[in-house]
């Protein structure tokens, strides 16, 4: 029993380090939990705004959110994230002086 508890603790500790949806652009990283938080926040706000349930969302619908990450090196850096109802990222745009796409193959793993 003690061995199972130890193995479980090690596995749970390692999960955040294995997240596949951390996004890197230059020297900065947007971590999985930030991406998940922003997607779920936008999705939940959309449902609340239109008094919908998740079953009301059609496959063709997509969602967009804009946010910033205060701890980034460049002040004023913003992000634009577009995703579908399965929380698969369609586009992820880094905005400072210009828009630049730095990776689009992200999918949430923490929900």
Image (tube, rainbow, N blue to C red):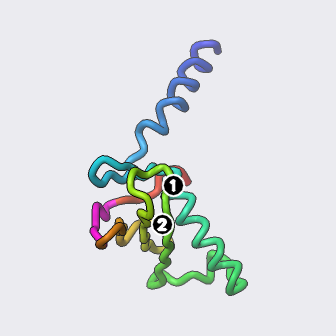
**In the image, residue 57 lies at what x, y percent?**
57, 81
The residue lying at 52 percent from left, 51 percent from top is: 33
Per the image, the residue denoted by label 1 is 70
Q: Nearer the viewer, residue 88 or 37?
A: 37
Quadrant assignment for the N terminus: top right
In the structure shown, which secondary structural element does the residue marked by tag 2 occupy?
Answer: loop
Q: Nearer the viewer, residue 100 or 32?
A: 100
Q: Is residue 16 above or below residue 52?
A: above
In the structure shown, which secondary structural element does the residue marked by tag 1 occupy?
Answer: loop
The residue lying at 72 percent from left, 84 percent from top is: 51
**Picture disc at residue 88:** none
**Picture disc at residue 87:** 2
Quadrant assignment for the C terminus: bottom right
Q: Is residue 78 above or below residue 2?
A: below
Please check the rendered image and state whether residue 67 is part of the magenta-colored stretch, yes or no: no
Magenta-colored span: 99-105
Q: Residue furthest front?
A: 75
The residue lying at 43 percent from left, 73 percent from top is: 82
Q: Is residue 24 above or below residue 11?
A: below
Q: Quadrant of residue 75?
A: bottom left
Q: Earlier in the sequence, mark 2 or mark 1?
A: 1
Q: What crowding class fits label 2: few (fewer than 14 Cα within 10 Å), some (14-19), or many (20 or more)?
A: some
Does residue 18 appear to the left or right of 3 in the view shown? Answer: left
Q: Is residue 20 above or below residue 78?
A: above
Measured in 3D between alpha carbons, the distance from the residue under mark 2 to the one under mark 1, in whole angstroms, is 24 Å
The residue lying at 63 percent from left, 75 percent from top is: 54
Q: Nearer the viewer, residue 26 or 56?
A: 26
Frontmost of labels 2 and 1 is 1
**In the image, residue 97 lies at what x, y percent?**
32, 70
**In the image, residue 17 lies at what x, y percent?**
43, 36
**In the image, residue 101 lies at what x, y percent?**
28, 67
């Amino acid at each position: 029993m003690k061995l199972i508890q130890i193995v479980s603790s090690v596995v749970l500790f390692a999960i955040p380090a294995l997240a596949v949806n951390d996004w890197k652009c230059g020297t900065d990283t947007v971590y999985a939990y930030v991406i998940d938080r922003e997607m779920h926040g936008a999705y939940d706000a959309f449902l609340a705004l239109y008094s919908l349930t998740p079953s009301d969302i059609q496959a063709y619908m997509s969602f967009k959110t804009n946010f910033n990450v205060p701890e980034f090196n460049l002040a004023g850096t913003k992000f634009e994230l577009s995703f579908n109802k399965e929380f698969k990222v369609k586009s992820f745009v880094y905005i400072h002086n210009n828009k630049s796409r730095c990776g689009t193959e992200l999918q949430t793993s923490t929900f």
